[in-house]
Amino acid sequence: MGYNQNMFGLGSKRSIIREIFEYSKSRAAEIGAENVYDFSLGNPSVPAPAEVNEAIRELLDTQSSVTLHGYTSAQGDAGVRQAIADRIQARFGVDISPNLIYMTCGAAASLSICLKAVIEEGAGDECIVFAPFFTEYRVFIQNAGGTPVVSKPLPKTFQIDVADFESRINEHTKAVIVNSPNNPSGVVYSEETVKALCEVLKRKSAEYGRVIYLIADEPYRELVYSGIEVPYLMNYYDNTLVCYSYSKSLSLPGERIGYIAVSPKMEECTNIYLTVCGAGRSLGYVCAPSLFQQVIARCIDAKVNVEAYRENRDLLYDNLTAYGYECVKPDGAFYLFVKALEDDAYKFFEKAKAHEILVVPCDDFGVEGYVRIAYCTDKARILGSLPAFEALAKEYGI
Ligand code: PLP
């Protein structure tokens, strides 16, 4: 066969989330969308802030369409990168130059670029991920020529198990991906966890005499509840690359816009930035969408209504735990990570499906026996689903 079998494998095997989403659409056509409790997809349900549409209108009315729809510099418009650098400085106290910011098509592109930049193909490089993790990490790491290594979480809290993490580090470890608030658990890693993690990274880098890069995957940074702080990893570890995205923070997943920030405290930060530029070039991720670069610069302080997600979280968490389900109370993102009512999450998924509840079995996220409920939906769907969740628990005799 004269084509790439790995890519054929990726393209022909649909992800479980997509499978469920397709099923949901066909089931909705049969019994009506209001009777299908689809919690499969992490598509924001809260609209983008008004500032976004205002900025688009203003840009269309005031800028030449040649500029607005034209190419920017490969790494992104200089003014936009300056606005982002200023925001990082003001918010996190990191004195970063716009020449360490690279505009991308969202966190997926940011991660692919960073991994391509730091992993040396053929050198046996490993990248540690913390279970439960976003399933695409495996794809991005392998595509960059690395090997994913999974670190197990602490039971119940789903915080990082620092001792387990330390035991996974060896002379091949090149990078570590941290995702907080986490998809699929909704857990925010505490400052204590972050400090312990970074202490291990510093010690192990020194022991093996090589840099281990920390990649912070931050699409959910702004979606946190009860004023909880998400530690900014550049302030804890010098060799950090931040992968940021506006997909969830401004509800713009279809616009494909985000950035990479290379820590100014990193050893050889200018060379690493140039390597990021090279990786972006080699992957074809240059000149992120021009219009949305400009929109972002004008909406740098805008926020979505996080309160709506918090209400959904409370409604689901309070009721599900009252019915006897077990789950960690999420402090961020818009996912609830629920222990299946039997060992096999797929069998549980099938039983939930019989009640028209669609959740995602999480074996591929690195933790068996759990399902993910994406509560980025309207409140009516959650309210409608509650009797079905209760009936499902009763079926298990709970
Ligand atoms: N990282 C995590 C943890 C995600 O959940 C997602 C999307 O759901 C991404 C990265 C990719 O986000 P983007 O739409 O910005 O590419």
Image: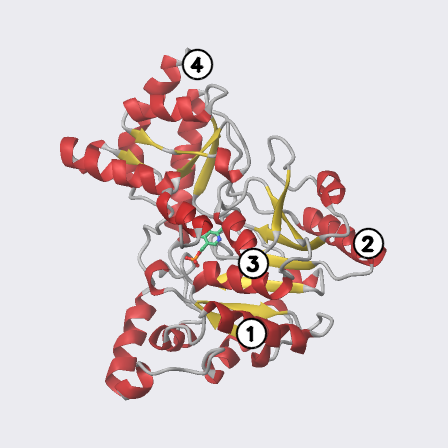
Q: Amino acid at mark 2?
A: Arg
Q: From the image, state whether disc 2 or disc 3 is nearer to you.
A: 3
| Callout 3 crowding tier (Cα within 10 Å): few <14, some 14–19, many ≥20 | many
For marks 3 and 4, give the CA distance. 46 Å
Q: Are marks 3 and 1 in contact (CB under 8 Å)?
A: no
> Nearer the viewer's eye, disc 2 or disc 1?
1
- Is 158 placed above or below 222 here? above
Say which amino acid is labelled 4: Ile
Of the two numbered discs 2 and 4 in the rendering, the one whose residue sits closer to the viewer? 2
- Indicate which disc, 2 or 3, sits on the residue closer to the N terminus: 3
Q: Secondary structure at mark 3?
A: loop
Which of the numbered marks, if any, corresponds to residue 278? 1
Q: Mark 2 highlights which residue?
A: 203
Chain-order first, disc 3 or disc 4 = 3
Residue type pointed to by label 3: Ala
Q: Nearer the viewer, mark 1 or mark 4?
A: 1
* Category of crowding for the residue at label 4, using alpha-carbon neighbours closer than 10 angstroms: few (below 14), some (14–19), many (at least 20): few
SS for callout 4:
loop
Quarter-wise, where is residue 3 in the image? bottom left
Q: CA distance from mark 1 to mark 4?
A: 56 Å
What numbered label is drawn on residue 398?
4
* One can see residue 375 in this view: no
Find residue 144 and name its label. 3
Near-viewer residue (168 or 380): 168
Q: Is residue 319 positioned above or below 293 on the image?
A: above
Secondary structure state at the residue bearing disc 2: helix
